[in-house]
Image (cartoon, coloured by chain):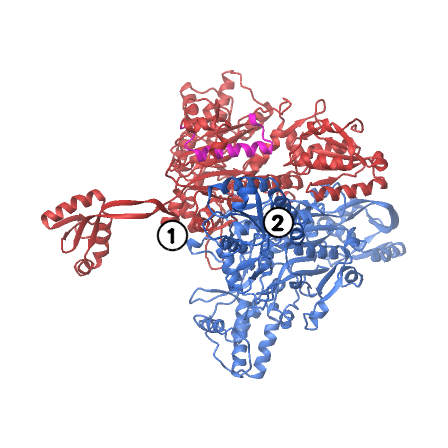
Chain colours: A red, B blue
Amino acid sequence: MRALACFSRATSLQPCHFVRHFTSATFVRAKFQPPKLDLKMAESTTKTGQPLDRVVLESVLRRRLFYTPSFEIYGGERGLFDYGPPGCALQANVVDLWRKHFVLEEDMLEVDCTMLTPEAILKTSGHVDKFADWMCKDPKSGEIFRADHLVEQVLEARLKADKDARGQAVEVDEAKEAKKKKKVKDTKIEKLDDALVQEYEETLAKIDNYGGDELAELIKKYNIKGPTTGAELEPPRAFNLMFQTQIGPSADKPNGYLRPETAQGQFLNFQKLLEFNQQSMPFASASIGKSFRNEISPRSGLLRVREFLMAEIEHFVDPEGGKKHPRFEDVKDTKLSLLNRKTQLGGSTKTDVVTIGDAVASGLVDNETLGYFLVRIQDFLLKLGIDQTKLRFRQHMANEMAHYAADCWDAELFTTYGWIECVGCADRSAYDLTVHKEKTGAPLVVRETRAQPLVVEEYEVDLERKKLGPKFRKDAKAVEAAVDALSQDLREKLALELEKSGKIEIDTPGVGSGRTELDKDLIKIEKRKRTEHVREYTPNVIEPSFGIGRILYSLMEHVFWVREGDSARGVLSFPPMVAPTKVLLVPLSGHADFKPFIKKLTARLRRIGVANKVDDSSASIGKRYARNDELGTPFGITIDFQTVKDGSLTLRERDSTKQVRASEDEIIAAVKALVDGEETWEDVVKRLPAFEGQEVE
Amino acid sequence: MRALACFSRATSLQPCHFVRHFTSATFVRAKFQPPKLDLKMAESTTKTGQPLDRVVLESVLRRRLFYTPSFEIYGGERGLFDYGPPGCALQANVVDLWRKHFVLEEDMLEVDCTMLTPEAILKTSGHVDKFADWMCKDPKSGEIFRADHLVEQVLEARLKADKDARGQAVEVDEAKEAKKKKKVKDTKIEKLDDALVQEYEETLAKIDNYGGDELAELIKKYNIKGPTTGAELEPPRAFNLMFQTQIGPSADKPNGYLRPETAQGQFLNFQKLLEFNQQSMPFASASIGKSFRNEISPRSGLLRVREFLMAEIEHFVDPEGGKKHPRFEDVKDTKLSLLNRKTQLGGSTKTDVVTIGDAVASGLVDNETLGYFLVRIQDFLLKLGIDQTKLRFRQHMANEMAHYAADCWDAELFTTYGWIECVGCADRSAYDLTVHKEKTGAPLVVRETRAQPLVVEEYEVDLERKKLGPKFRKDAKAVEAAVDALSQDLREKLALELEKSGKIEIDTPGVGSGRTELDKDLIKIEKRKRTEHVREYTPNVIEPSFGIGRILYSLMEHVFWVREGDSARGVLSFPPMVAPTKVLLVPLSGHADFKPFIKKLTARLRRIGVANKVDDSSASIGKRYARNDELGTPFGITIDFQTVKDGSLTLRERDSTKQVRASEDEIIAAVKALVDGEETWEDVVKRLPAFEGQEVE
């Protein structure tokens, strides 16, 4: 179970947090793991340099129904959230952009596989046995805790209390700490032995390494009790994070799961996809869809949820020839902010800004294909409106990766929760295709005609089957298998022996004494040449894997700011391409004369594919715009009495609140150009006459 | 459980099948039920008048990876399908069109709610208790059958055998029938008593009405055994069609389900959506997402699956004022093909083509809002490429609808499986909001200021609570409740009585003798006026509900045809707007001179948002086009040596195989106009010079 350590991901800026990841991780996947929270909110600033107040942002997001806890009128269900209209539109725009940026531009083969997954598949992939966390129960209250989180929380609280007792200055949010203390019963302000402090710190550094038995030992050793009851805890037990269910009426127990990732469906269809791609390599499949993880204790809003939207790419590439990428040349000069393994080992989180060309050339990034995708991921995130100063690529530590992985980089976004892993980009080697091939016998391989036929010279073994059966009876098959399994080296030796003495002896486990004699009537070993025209190989997989919900949340943090001098006026500066609504139509009042203009404008904008909304409520124009600033609507068109006279309209830009006035045709053309990204607001301001007025409360 | 009869939907053209639905259906939902299959394939023709051969179509769809059984290399899992690249793109285009056609054009509030749903919600909605089918088990083989389907299958087989014995001509596919007989052991060619024939026919006509006990009785009475073993069957038991799971680590048994529909999430968020809509009514919410039903025995390919994509609208409307719709005027002259309730009662399936204006005016369609959506549904389906001659709207029978529903129409599409319900459009009254409001106390209501304050004159009752307690002690509350519940009529009578005799006697169930005396010291009843400024009501819901998978499959049947004289050349004539890929780029050969043109064209088309693919395989141009006809790609651009000389290109249209030749700019402009629907191929052919050549195998 310790293999699962790689699922826990630190996100703090503190170097010590990274040390926790130096685990001997052997499990198959390492992506989208819940962030560990700092004791206090990470300090982040808005684009105007103000401190970002998460509480203010969250109140805007909830008020404007970007998202809301699911089933709230029934008391809610932790770890489940619904997206309201703006969140849903934002998500659809991000998905649309993803599809254009990856599937269309890269000519990927998109598939839509089912979420319901029979047990056999996830048994083979390793999830049934290993996709679990350790939990322990407080028998008195019935509360359930993630064992590693509990140990961590208690030890951190004790260390904190110790520091307080020693009178060291610790920056903490006092109200929060008070609350925390109330919850964690055993944290009196108490000085600890120096040795114990060191022991605690070492334990915390290794917390991700511990399995169930070790966690049980720590709980006992450090006398950790139920935090609300003080009761003895039940020993930790493994809790599989997949949701189980029963497919069909005939099973008498659960026989399937909700998928924990979209990748498996893509692997299982590899053969058909290769055929669809006319046997041509390399190629990528892609999938956008929900996945599910039954978190023991969901928290951090949208960052750790039980049902989430993923977008995953599986790029299949020939493992020979250095995993080159045909378009690498186009991106090689792009700079990325990289936090490499070595730096982390040295306890630092300093990033290096280097071109991907240099990074691949120096071997820092394993190969061109991986490097190409890191650039494409960065391009995508920046298009969405992610703040480049809050984006870094962090390399996995050697023992943080799955055992078969060649290299792995996470795109991390900085938020008030710390650095959050939002996209994983791993070289998964041939692992998945191999295990499914071995389990099912399906030829999940590429067969390609060799440009130059390959001449192979090898020792081949011929058995006289007619005599083998009568001689060995029930053991004949085992003997045959043992012969087939002989290595080339061994065959060479045995060929000589056979020639010399007319008989040989080979290992046959389970047959007789374990050794079996075969004479030359039964076996022949010869060196022969043969020509191979076809090469067969299992492709390697480079897998960029996106957590859409995490990207959405981080984006909302990155584009949020508050107008100078008025903390109540929040703005979400989404780029027009991803903004939920592009244009707000605002009639000066409910006057009947404005209605035909609104109707006409709405229809015109819709025809050119520009999502728009009308706000003809009785609030002041300023109030109506303020509401839409919170919704992130980038443009506003006002219809006033001048419009009725001469058909002219004003166009307002969200971030600057500047306005221009021009004819309907000119305004529509400007909006179209702005939304399509063909013009910037600065271009428009230069072209069209400025308008001053109305924008007051 | 008989309430569930409304879930079974006949789709045959045979009038007798409809008779089966005259049930006393009381359950909540009646949509997307698996079609009943005819004994033989329904006859359908392609647009060229050829008989549609489902086997040929299915082989094209599988070969081209529109869809494929999920987990096939693991032996597959019934009722689950993956969409491959063309199916996935088709689905994305249909969803995109749906979003534009409904969400954007109608200004709906789209939400994305979780699929995981705690039990309490589905308990309230009725699904936990009633969303079930009856199954029975063959104890010998372990096979499980849907009880009603089994009875039906056996009786139909016996009737068929009887007809054979009587020497009546019956059109059947002999190979199929032979296979069937092999499966159903007891169908010897055997003549039945006339009385028994009539009894069987009556039973079949009522098959959807039977509950578990009745089905058990039928199985016994008609001596129905396990079809493959001949063994006595276990008695039918209810099987809930929802997938159960366990949310969180603390539950000791399943505590949640995968949603069977997207509607509940929308109802639960009603209050927040109304607030988001600035308290303005009417409005609609919408949701696109997967739902799940654990079918006992999935069949019919994409038509009856366990995991499926739905798009649902919940339009909330004031129940007063006739449910008018502001845009009804715009659609009132649109004609629909309606199969009304009365016609079905008369045993016919004749449709009437009437304008929706007339249908609403005559009361055939209950109200304007319902009528408006029927037109919008038709518009949407026709935009997709649905064949209008294979579309009808069938009204639910009175006892086929949920008990509270005012009216319900299904958009049905004709396929080789018969008429398939693809969109349901029901007036669900205030049912769901009311049950959730009652269960949770959440105010799922609209409060609106009355234009004219309402003066209400009513009898009000005042109780002297100080005396009530001491006098009635533990019964005080019951007495108070009984008083509160008194109707206005009764209050009027009691007021007179109280004035006359100084005391009254009221019904108080469970208190003393069941009657309680109250005197005028305790109670006062007076007629009083009060003015109501706010009106409070629970909105009614009109719910258009789309089964996207069913629409996709029907569409593929509607647009499929085979080129004259060559049955191997299938074509899928998707309209450009929904076609998976819009343009195929075909270089004459792999010559290096063509490559820069391909690269440039791909980039130009992508920039204007036109999905395109390159086929530079070594197959002949004709073969490459034939492959793409099967993928439904509407246009093809050929790059040949003339292109290298003068930059001109040929553009080919899929259905006519006609080609034009023009400059790159002209061809790109034509493609854009064609894909956007601004020009037809006929327009293009008139403008640009025809090109003859190449299109040979």
Viewer-closest of B679 and A677: B679
Classify the position of the C terminus of chain A by image quarter.
Answer: top right
Residue type at tag 2:
Val
Question: Which x, y percent locates residue A574?
Answer: 64, 33
Residue A384 part of the magenta segment: yes
Residue B139 is inside the magenta segment: no
Estimate the x, y position of residue B68 in percent, counting from the top left. 49, 55
Kindly identify which residue carries mark 1.
A440
Which three-letter amino acid code belongs to the residue tagged 1? Thr
Most common secondary structure along the magenta stretch: helix
Chain at tag 1: A
Circles 2 and 1 on the same chain: no
Q: Nearer the viewer, residue A579 or A664?
A: A664
Q: Secondary structure at mark 2?
A: helix
Q: Residues within 10 Å of mark 1 (few under 14, many from 20)?
A: some
Horizontal and vertical percent position of residue B370: 73, 56
Report the Cα–Cα distance between label 2 and label 1: 35 Å
**Residue A306 seen from this side:** no
Identify the chain of the residue marked 2, using the numbered disc in the image. B
Which residue is rendered at x = 59% and y = 73% of the image? B204
User: Which of the 4 quarters of the picture holds residue A417?
Assistant: top right
Determine contact: label 2, label 1, CB under 8 Å: no
Q: State left or right for residue A500 relative to residue A228.
A: left
Q: Is residue A259 visible?
A: yes
Please tell me whether mark 1 sits on a helix, a strand or a loop.
Answer: helix
Q: Which residues fall within the magenta stretch?
A: A363-389
Query: Where A470 sits versus B183, above or below?
Result: above
Crowd band around label 2 with a 10 angstrom C-alpha radius: few (<14), some (14–19), many (20+): some
The numbered dot on residue A608 is none
The one nearer the camera, B120 or A377, is A377
On residue B95, the disc is 2
Q: Residue B525 versus residue B681: which sits nearer the camera?
A: B681
